[in-house]
Image: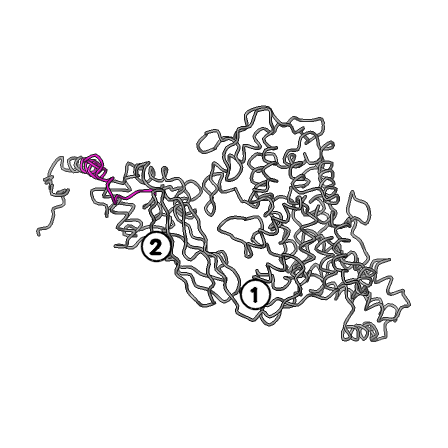
């Protein structure tokens, strides 16, 4: 064959010679345009639908999955922050196919596609990295993806007809399987369509394990199991739908016995441990349980007298009785009030916030102490109206003013659903769309505000009118709709927030009860059954789904009784397991085969130090002796350096992650030599001062220190070592013997300091 001249154009069997000379370039440009138009006409069906016959390529069903698999429409590429990349913009994960089609086919005068020569289309050249591409090669030459993409362009880039089948569900095979460490499992993904057809989409689906330390996935859906036993989920995503493969990884150790079963928690946890072959630890001793439950339920250490009484008691039910006593104490209400008010943004930004903050904190604390049903508290909060002094729950609207923040906070805190993404685009890992977001926001659209004579305070009321919000993208009105439900017709005279409150407590609500019991489970066990605790979605399943369902059902049937949740958890044998692992379960991090030690929170640790040293911290505007767990807002973080160093949150976020629980170098240094802690050790009328003046024998003083710090008696070795330390001869800088009384006092300070810096003191175990 002879070479084609540069001024020739070929199209099918048509060849055009442009010649040379003046006007050639203009003629070539004109012919290029005509041929492009002709190719589009032929490709889109010059015979009225040639591209629509059987086997034609559909943009949504065939092209979008290729772009998603190649990460073209990921947030780090052409779906970046709504502006795209280098002039080319796509919707996040292809959730807006109509817009993507416009950007690809029509934007930039159609320069990205060239039906006359599909292989020369910029879309193909870039994806295959034939033309330099910042994202590198995304598809291989000659691959199935390459052939489908070029075929679609050659057919004239059909979008598809409204009658074309649509993906209705996604199925992953196997859906649930047990795999041993080191084993590989190939997943198969089937897309079910509206016409009843099924397509194998394994190659174009996306895969991601929720615990990458337990399993790894390839782009083709091959799952590799690592060495950690437990349960892991592999999320499979295709065409806007999500499915999950749940994998159990057995350790395979013999589970011949377990502690006694006290309630359904024990039944379900021990059954799961037996299934995966992880033997549970033994029950903890009385001293450990006393300290653990006191810290977890009431936020404080047991006193020396409480420890002695509990350890000496022979009552077989003393652990259950302790739980009841703690639930009836003021410490329970104070401790959990601090937890909830931080999540509900009870923060002080200005001096005039103090009245609202104190009133709101008192409202939460009083409701917890009287055990007001949880759904009633949620109703009073969400539908609050009036002024703060008359109705303190109104204070939430003082801090959370915008409907956007209201919908996102309510969804995350009360439902465990993160809706932030859905404001702009479909949630990447869930089913929530912009319709869901703005339908939920419409419940808050009629919240009215009217200034009062008090600076910074508004009267909150229901504005009469049609409840609806505006989709910021489409500019269309959206009526109120609960998550996953149809739109509601609400009379202008009715407050839409009451309809939302009704749905929250409805027994069919799949989120409300689960979110609460999962949040409380994490409080007591360090990690939730679903973790993070406020990210409930199909693609993040519970490690023990049967247990989560049972806890939620018990909570609903019990009338949303918060104390009952605490009671059933802390009275279970699972909660009372030792934190000391046996020879098999040390690697377990999610199945609760032993208690997971956790660092004391900032407030609890400060109160524990105050109680241990006998030197309380004083807080401005509050009565002497007020504990850190009783502080009403975040303002005390500024004056109490300890609280800031140890991560007490500011109440800026509805997420528990704002609280810092990880240990740090600054914390270690503060505990070792901070001036405020040194002052507590040497304080007049403090524990050291009292013990130094006491005529008791050293062994009794040591026992008191161990009971005060660890709620247990010292071991024989610990007692012997401490006695030797207190009785040793101490010399001053000149080599002379130090005054015995002064030496004994300094030795007591050192011993108390050593116990206070021990991990046994700093952690709840």
Q: Residue at x 45, y 40 (%)?
A: 425
Give the quarter of the image for residue 733: bottom right
> On the rendered structure, is 97 left or right of 625?
left
Across and down, in percent, residue 75 comes to 43, 46
Total labels: the figure holds: 2
**Between 206 and 231, the one nearer to me in the picture:** 231
Q: Position of residue 211 (x, y in %)?
A: 50, 58
Front-most of residues 713 and 50: 50
> Callout 1 environment at 10 Å: few (<14), some (14 to 19), or many (20+)?
many
Residue furthest left in the image: 2
Q: Quadrant of the C terminus?
A: bottom right
Residue 412 highlighted magenta (yes or no): no
Residue at 63 percent of width and 53 percent of height: 521
Residue 755 image point, x, y percent: 75, 65
Q: Is residue 144 above or below residue 31?
A: below
In the image, the segment drawn in magenta is 33-60
Q: Is residue 573 left or right of residue 720?
A: left
Q: Nearer the viewer, residue 177 or 61?
A: 177
Q: On the rendered structure, is 147 left or right of 337?
A: left
Which residue does the numbered mark 2 point to in the structure image?
203
Residue 361 coordinates in the image, percent (x, y):
72, 41
Q: How is the image coloured?
A: one colour
Q: Quadrant of residue 542?
A: bottom right
Residue positioned 52% across, 42% down in the render: 419
Q: CA distance from mark 2 to mark 1?
A: 36 Å
Say whether marks 2 and 1 touch (CB < 8 Å).
no
Residue hosting label 1: 274
Above or below, comparing residue 425 to residue 727 in the picture: above
Q: At numbered mark 2, what does the secondary structure look like: helix, strand or loop?
A: loop
């Amino acid at each position: 064959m002879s070479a084609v001249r540069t001024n020739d154009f070929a199209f099918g069997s048509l060849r055009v010679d442009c010649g040379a000379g003046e006007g050639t370039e203009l003629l070539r440009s004109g012919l290029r345009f005509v041929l492009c138009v002709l190719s589009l006409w032929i490709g889109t069906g010059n015979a009225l639908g040639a591209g629509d016959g059987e086997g034609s390529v559909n943009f949504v069903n065939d092209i979008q999955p290729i772009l998603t698999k190649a990460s073209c429409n990921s947030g780090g590429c052409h779906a970046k922050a709504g502006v795209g990349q280098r002039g080319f913009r796509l919707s996040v994960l292809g959730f807006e196919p109509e817009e993507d089609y416009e950007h690809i086919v029509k934007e930039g005068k159609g320069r990205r596609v060239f039906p006359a020569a599909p292989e020369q289309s910029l879309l193909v050249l870039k994806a295959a990295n034939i033309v330099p591409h910042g994202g590198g090669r995304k598809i291989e030459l000659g691959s199935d993806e390459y052939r489908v993409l070029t075929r679609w362009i050659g057919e004239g880039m059909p979008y598809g007809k409204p009658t074309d089948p649509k993906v209705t569900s996604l199925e992953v095979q196997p859906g649930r399987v047990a795999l041993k460490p080191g084993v590989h499992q190939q997943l198969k993904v089937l897309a079910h369509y509206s016409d009843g057809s099924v397509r194998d989409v394994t190659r174009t689906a996306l895969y991601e394990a929720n615990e990458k330390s337990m399993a790894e996935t390839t782009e083709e859906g091959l799952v590799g199991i690592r060495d950690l036993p437990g349960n892991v989920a592999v999320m499979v995503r295709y065409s806007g739908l999500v499915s999950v493969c749940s994998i159990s990884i057995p350790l395979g150790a013999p589970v011949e016995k377990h502690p006694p079963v006290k309630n359904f928690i024990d039944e379900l946890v021990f059954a799961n441990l037996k299934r995966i072959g992880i033997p549970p630890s033994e029950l903890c001793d009385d001293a450990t349980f006393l300290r653990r439950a006191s810290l977890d339920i009431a936020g404080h250490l047991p006193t020396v007298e409480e420890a002695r009484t509990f350890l000496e008691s022979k009552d077989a039910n003393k652990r259950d009785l302790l739980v009841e006593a703690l639930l009836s104490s003021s410490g329970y209400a104070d401790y959990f009030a601090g937890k909830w008010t931080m999540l509900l943004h009870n923060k002080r930004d200005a001096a005039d916030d103090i009245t609202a903050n104190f009133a709101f904190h008192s409202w939460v604390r009083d409701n917890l102490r009287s055990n007001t049903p949880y759904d009633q508290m949620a109703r009073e909060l969400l539908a609050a109206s009036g002024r703060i002094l008359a109705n303190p729950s109104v204070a939430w609207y003082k801090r959370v003013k915008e409907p956007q923040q209201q919908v996102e906070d309510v969804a995350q805190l009360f439902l465990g659903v993160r809706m932030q993404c859905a404001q702009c685009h479909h949630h990447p890992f869930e089913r929530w769309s912009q319709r869901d977001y703005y339908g939920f926001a419409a419940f808050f659209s009629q919240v009215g505000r009217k200034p009062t004579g008090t600076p910074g305070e508004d009267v909150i009321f229901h504005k009469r009118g049609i409840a609806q919000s505006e989709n910021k993208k489409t500019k269309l009105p959206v009526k109120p709709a609960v998550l996953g439900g149809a739109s509601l017709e609400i009379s202008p005279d009715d407050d839409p927030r009451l309809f939302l409150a009704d749905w929250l407590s409805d027994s069919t609500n799949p989120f409300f009860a689960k979110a609460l019991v999962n949040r409380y489970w994490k409080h007591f066990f360090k990690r939730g059954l679903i973790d993070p605790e406020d990210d409930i979605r199909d693609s993040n399943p519970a490690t023990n789904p049967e247990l989560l369902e049972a806890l939620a059902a018990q909570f609903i049937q019990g009338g949303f009784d918060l104390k009952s949740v605490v009671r059933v958890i802390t009275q279970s044998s699972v909660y009372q397991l030792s934190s000391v692992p046996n020879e098999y379960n040390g690697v377990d991090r999610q199945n609760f085969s032993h208690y997971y030690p956790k660092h004391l929170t900032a407030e609890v640790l400060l109160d524990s130090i105050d109680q241990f040293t006998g030197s309380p911290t004083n807080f401005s505007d509050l009565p002497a002796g007020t504990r850190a767990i009783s502080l009403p807002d975040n303002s005390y973080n500024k004056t109490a350096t300890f609280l800031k160093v140890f991560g007490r949150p500011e109440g800026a976020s509805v997420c528990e992650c704002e609280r810092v629980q990880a240990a740090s170098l600054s914390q270690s240094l503060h505990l070792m030599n901070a001036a405020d802690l040194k002052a507590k050790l040497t304080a007049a009328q403090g524990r050291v001062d009292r013990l130094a003046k006491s005529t008791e024998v050293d062994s009794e003083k040591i026992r008191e220190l161990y009971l005060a710090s660890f709620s247990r008696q010292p071991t024989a070795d610990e007692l012997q070592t401490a006695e030797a330390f207190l009785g040793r001869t101490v010399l001053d800088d000149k080599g002379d013997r130090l005054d015995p009384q002064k030496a004994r006092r300094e030795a007591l300070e050192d011993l108390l300091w050593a116990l206070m810096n021990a991990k046994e003191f700093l952690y709840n175990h």
